[in-house]
Image (tube, helix red, strand yellow):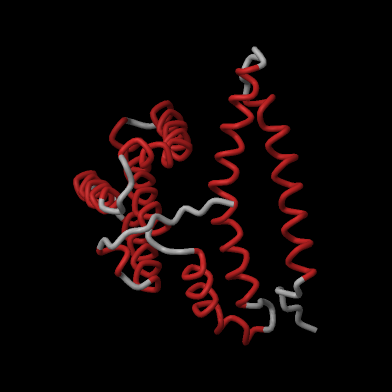
Amino acid sequence: MQSLYVEGNSRMHRLSPRAKLLSLTAFAILLFISHNLLLLSGAVLVAAVLYGTVGLPIGEALLRLRPIFLTIAVVALFNLIFNPWQAALVPVLRLTALMLLAASVTATTTITEFIDEVTALARPLERTGRVQADDIGLALGLVLRFVPEIVNRYQAIREAHKARGLKVRPTSLLAPLIILTLRDADNVAAAIDARRIRRHGS
């Protein structure tokens, strides 16, 4: 499976994974408590500049963001229908800034670093007896691994439909995509259990 990580030596690459995750959390909180359009626009600009420094060609950088941009476009459309344009612009700017910063973090942090940091941050929760920090870290790592794989598989199914002269419709693409993704998830789960990676509390 492909990774979202991009090799490089930018400032974002050199920043510790914990600092990046905590900064992302703080950035998200600030975004969602602010309604100032000027401040939110500045946040989008800063996040875009950071994303531009990760070392991706412009075409690939935009391609990675396309599925999320489509989601934001839908959100914008619904907000414009029911709200004035100023109010509708607020969630769009929030989501765009958060998406760009999150993309910067995932592009400059390896899966192993993500798992280690999330596991360490979740360790205190084990005292409740309800969660296992290792399982939380593993779950996040698997999600990050599957995201680019699902996107690539969607593109492959779409191209296969076009090659056969079939009309490309979301309904006709989603069914095989879901089936293949669930099959892969079952295979990964079986491999994890066979290697006794997950810890099960009593």
Please give the name of the residue rendered at 60% of the width and 18% of the height, measured from the top-left corner.
Answer: 162
Using residue 122 as the reference point, say whether residue 18 is left or right of it. left
Total tally of numbered discs in the picture: 0
Whether residue 41 sits left or right of residue 164 in the image: it is left
Image coords of residue 63 (percent x, y): 41, 37
Q: Is residue 87 above or below residue 197?
A: above
Q: Residue at x 30, y 38 (%)?
A: 58
Indicate the position of residue 14 as horizontal and vertical percent values: 30, 69
Residue that lies at the very extreme toward the bottom in this rendered image: 127
Task: Specify the quadrant of the image occupied by residue 18.
Answer: bottom left
Q: Which quarter of the picture shows residue 32?
A: bottom left
Closer-to-camera residue (16/71): 16
Give me the residue at 65% from left, 72% from top: 135
Is residue 77 placed above or below 128 in the rendered structure?
above
Q: Position of residue 12 (x, y in %)?
A: 30, 63
Q: Residue at x 30, y 51 (%)?
A: 55
Q: Quarter holding the C terminus?
A: bottom right
Q: Is residue 190 above or below residue 126?
A: above
Classify 149 as above or below 175.
Answer: below
- 13 horizontally vs 128: left or right: left
- Judge by depth and name the residue closer to the eye, 84 or 112: 112
Residue 111 spot, x, y in % from top left: 50, 64
